[in-house]
Amino acid sequence: MPRLAAFGLAVDLPAGWEGRARRRTPEPGATALPILHAASFPLPAERGDYGGGAVELMSADDVFVTLFEHDPAAAGSPLFARPGRPLRLPPEDFQPNALQRVLPGQSGLQSFFTEDGRAFCLYVVLGSHVRRFVLAPRAEAIVRSLAIGAGS
Amino acid sequence: MAVEALALAVLALMVVGLLRSHAEILRRLHDLGVNLDDDTPSPAHAGSTHGPVRVGPPSPRTQGQAAPAIVGVTPFDEAVTIAPASGGRDTVLAFLTTGCTSCRPFWDAVRDPATGSSGRRMVVVTRGPGDESVSAARALTQDGTDVVMSSDAWVDYAVPGAPYFVHVSGATGRVSGEGTAQTLAQVLELLTAAEGDAQVPGPWSSDAEREAHVDRELEAAGIHPGDPRLYHEPPQA
């Protein structure tokens, strides 16, 4: 199974899945922190942090996962108080109104957590809210395969 | 005198033999698409009057091979894993270098929004950052162009030289055509033809293979062994 690894993050990608990881363009004086995208469809070279430019290409069978690192100073703060990533993504936790970019039929989930001293936002988009019971386990498998280590 | 003449004749024979051997090596390298002179494109790749060459069904190296994922980085330090048949979409992998003259028109073509890829995804694959100029790759990459730097991909796809193109079928996830030509338009056209050829049954390597194919076709049509239609003419209307 192909593995994407960069910036102290790694993820196993099942057949047909793609992944990309880069450092975001920082604010002046700030550190460039990484963002990782994994998708069950071809990821365009140009896309926004929360999948703008990519989620529009999703079919009803597709899944899109973003792991977005925030300033390490935020680790452990109330927003990021959850210790570790969510290892279960229950289908009932996905909601159309949780999408960063609302597209008809899609569903989203957002979770903030601290792991290994790093603060993250996990954002998942399902191509179909109706099919969330089929798609959520696929997203969950990706999240479980994530490896988070010391940042670089 | 006679000894000198004999020595000269032997030397002449050796020189002729060496020249022939050298010419044979060059001819074989050329057939593989390798151009030893970076500044002088081979006739097949330059703007010559020769027709496009070597685009066809998969070579024995990649025949039936499931297209491996391409793992590398972009020229802008993004780590990338690309699945060529992802989403069931046909993909053309364009193996290019930043230095070869004959690659330049292809770089221009993939950056040109007017170049139609007939619905296929186009991914440029250069060698990895250790074997390729990252700054040159950046200069040749335009917003939206999918460029991956990966020496492993060149090995995985047994790429003989640049420019070289591999077509991956979105339906099967396998290599369905490969080769090179003078222009990107020709590459796309010929890969389409190669894919069509690959779907035509035969030629059969043995009578048993042909027979098995006929049996499958008949079974698909609902005609099984012993079916009377195999032995009688259909009634006239």
Image (tube, coloured by chain):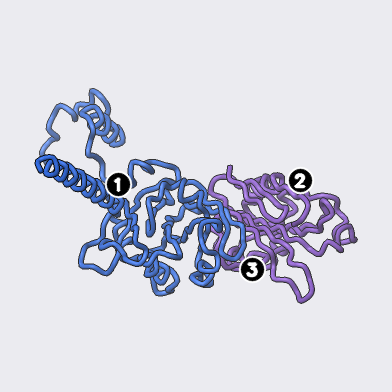
Chain colours: A purple, B blue
Residue B221, given in percent of the width and then of the height, sits at 28, 36
Name the residue that disc number 3 marks. Answer: A48
Q: What is the three-letter code of the residue carrying label 1? A: Ala
Task: Report the label total.
Answer: 3
The Cα atoms of the two marked residues, 2 and 3, are separated by 25 Å
Question: Quadrant location of the C terminus of chain A?
Answer: bottom right
Tell me if label 1 and label 2 are in contact, CB under 8 Å: no
Q: Earlier in the sequence, mark 2 or mark 3?
A: 3
**Which residue is nearer to you in this view: A60 or B126?**
B126
Q: Is residue B189 left or right of residue A71?
A: left
User: Closer to the camera: disc 1 or disc 2?
Assistant: 1
Task: Look at the numbered disc 2 and give the secondary structure of its residue.
Answer: loop
Which residue is found at the position 23% from the left and 51% from the top? Answer: B23
Q: Residues within 10 Å of mark 1 (few under 14, many from 20)?
A: some
Name the residue that disc number 1 marks. Answer: B198
Name the residue that disc number 2 marks. Answer: A87
Which residue is found at the position 57% from the left and 50% from the top? Answer: A17
Q: Is residue B35 visible?
A: yes
Task: Look at the numbered disc 1 and give the secondary structure of its residue.
Answer: helix
Residue B122 lies in what quarter of the image? bottom left
Task: Look at the numbered disc 3 and give the secondary structure of its residue.
Answer: loop
User: Closer to the camera: disc 2 or disc 3?
Assistant: 3
Q: Is residue B187 left or right of residue A101?
A: left
Which residue is found at the position 22% from the left and 62% from the top? Answer: B51
Q: Is residue A61 visible?
A: no
The chain carrying label 3 is A
